[in-house]
Image (cartoon, grey):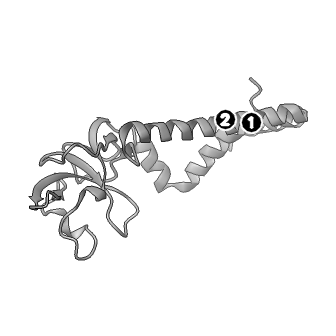
Amino acid sequence: MGVASMLQIDEMLGDFNRMNKRQSLYQVLSFAMIVSSALMIWKGLMVATGSESPIVVVLSGSMEPAFHRGDLLFLTNYKEDPVRVGEIVVFKVEGRDIPIVHRVIKLHEKEDGSVKFLTKGDNNNVDDRGLYAPNQLWLTKKDIVGRARGFLPYVGIITIFMNEYPKVKWAILSILAIFVLLHRE
């Protein structure tokens, strides 16, 4: 760290020491309000879109040229909308924590009205059966997290960077938290 950075940290700590209990409590409550507002916005998006994860980041190049690594996708998952061949869906597979973004390539409709489908990444040579849970050959509606409705190119690369370098993520979050707690306005 440079001398300027150390001086700024010392100045912030001095500001914190000069605060009385009421100011400190106000800063902590302001921070809690920011966090709770973000959570409320996220939950509101979940309700409005019908998706448990209304915004996702593309983590690999398997959907190129449609989407690139770091693209931010906006999802909806309205139960009444049928899944169609050619749609880009985000799905979760049992045993995997991270959802997958791929295109529906085949539908299998049964006589009872249930629909199963098969997916594949645009940049992959084979379908996704190798990614599904053991003995699973098709996806069902319950596996779908959402369908891509829009995207912002490369905006999510920040998320990828912060997940690949967790020390950077914690440093940035710590600096932001300190700033919010110590900033008086």
From the viewer's perspective, is 137 left or right of 145? left
Q: Label 2: which residue?
A: 33
Q: Residue type at mark 1? A: Leu
Could you tell me residue 7's position as x and y percent? 77, 35
Could you tell me residue 136's position as x and y percent? 22, 71
From the viewer's perspective, is 6 left or right of 68? right
Q: Are marks 2 and 1 in contact (CB under 8 Å)?
A: yes
Q: Residue type at mark 2? A: Met
Could you tell me residue 60's position as x and y percent? 30, 53
**Quadrant of res 10:** top right
Q: Label 1: which residue?
A: 29
Q: Circle 1 — which element?
A: helix
Could you tell me residue 91's position as x and y percent? 30, 56
| Residue appearing at x 64%, y 39% in the figure | 176
Residue found farthest to the bottom: 135
| Image position of 100 with respect to 13: above or below | below
From the viewer's perspective, is 88 left or right of 175? left
Residue 26 seen anywhere in this rendered image of the structure:
yes
